[in-house]
Image: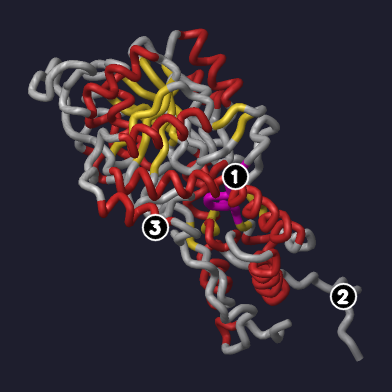
Amino acid sequence: MSGRKLALNGGVAVRSAPYPPWPSLGPGDLDRVSDILKSTHWGGGGEAVEAFEEIFAQYHDASFGIAVSSGTMALELALHALGIGPEDEVIVPAHSFVATALAVSRVGAAPVFVDIEPDTYNIDPVRIGEAVSDRTRAMIPVHFGGVMADLDRISTVASDRGISVVEDAAHAHGAEWYGMRAGGIGTCGIFSFQNSKAMSAGEGGILITSDETLAARGRSVANAGRLPERGWFEHFEIGTNLRMTAVQAVLLGCQLERLQDQVRLRETNFRRFADGLAEVEGLELQRAPAGAIVQTRYIVPGRVDEKRFGLGRDEFVAAVQAEGVPVRPFYPHPLYANPVFRQVRHRTLPCPAAEQATRDSFWLPLRLFMGTPEDAADAARAIAKVHRASRPRPAFPTNGSAAG
């Protein structure tokens, strides 16, 4: 155990060894990628991409998959395939990566920003109901950190009003809601394979759905407006080229084989981490709703209560980082505060929980939970050490007389 003096103040850090790198290669990955590179089938649309689309969609309880160049493009493709455009509104959470909202703007619709739940960091189903208007065509719940949003309540609001649900599962590869996997429950779902994601090809994404008509339109748009069994130079609608390469598909197929074991590993290590924080006051980690029975722990958000913990969020982050644990502050502002939304049509509901998260919340990355249980325990030890050094000291009662 390191000494009590904080590393930030010249003490010995709890941990000096780096956490496991991410992304990382597994056994056989290079061989399979090499086989593709030795062939002439590097581009999209071939057997390697089709095989990945099929198995990834099936794994996530959907019938069809369309692999594309990024998660951002998968979002845009979903909205295009749903026919969403000018005069329409799409409900999005106040916190996510900006692509969740910009995809709406890029198809000509207006994002409607809705508050998050303070404990799950996911979009608040009650606030969704308040945000619906005559122009609402879709909503995009984000499964933040790999903890699924409350799809039962969200789906009830959507079905009562005939609104499509596009699951943004960029954080949620392999997550489950009462036994159904992320992306396959709503009208459609999207995933990202960007460099930091739980499955990564550096970049990449996929749209999955069980709606055959939506899938056919999405595939056509992603493939320059072509149709199956028609000529390469025949184009039937305004499409573009969003195709994923064969190299990416093969690499992702390798990772899909390891996904379930890695999700279990992160959950085991997260439990060790959470157990080590049992005596730490003023720290609250993300809560999962009852239906979110498998959580991927892509990132683990939490919040610091300055009065109870003894430090504000920014001081907490600096102190824990100095102890050798990767942690970063939450988003600096809600999505609607980005300068771009001064220029484009949108609507914003009151978002007090989202505003508060920018002041008191942080997150821990996936790689912290990809090693051993002791690696995860080190993170808890570091936070506990910072807490011991920082917690408020109780005031001693006095009888009003001076000591003699």
- Under circle 2, the secondary element is loop
Whichever of labels 1 and 3 marks the residue nearer the N terminus, that label is 3
Q: Nearer the viewer, residue 148 or 315?
A: 148
Q: Which residue is denoted by mark 2 in the rendering?
A: 400
What type is the residue that disc 3 sits on? Asp
Q: Is residue 350 magenta?
A: no
Is residue 131 in view from this perspective?
A: no
Residue at the spot of label 1: 260
Name which residue lies at 52% across and 72% down. Answer: 318
Q: Quadrant of residue 311?
A: bottom right
Asked if 16 appears above or below 256 in the picture, the reply is: below
Which residue is found at the position 27% from the left and 16% from the top? 83
Q: As rendered, which of 112 and 269 lies closer to the eye?
A: 269
Give the number of the mark in front: 1 or 3.
3
Split into 4 quadrants, where in the image is the C terminus?
A: bottom right
Circle 3 is placed at which residue position? 31
Residue 385 x/y as whole percent: 69, 74
Q: Which residues are magenta?
A: 295-303
Locate residue 281: give its quadrant: bottom right
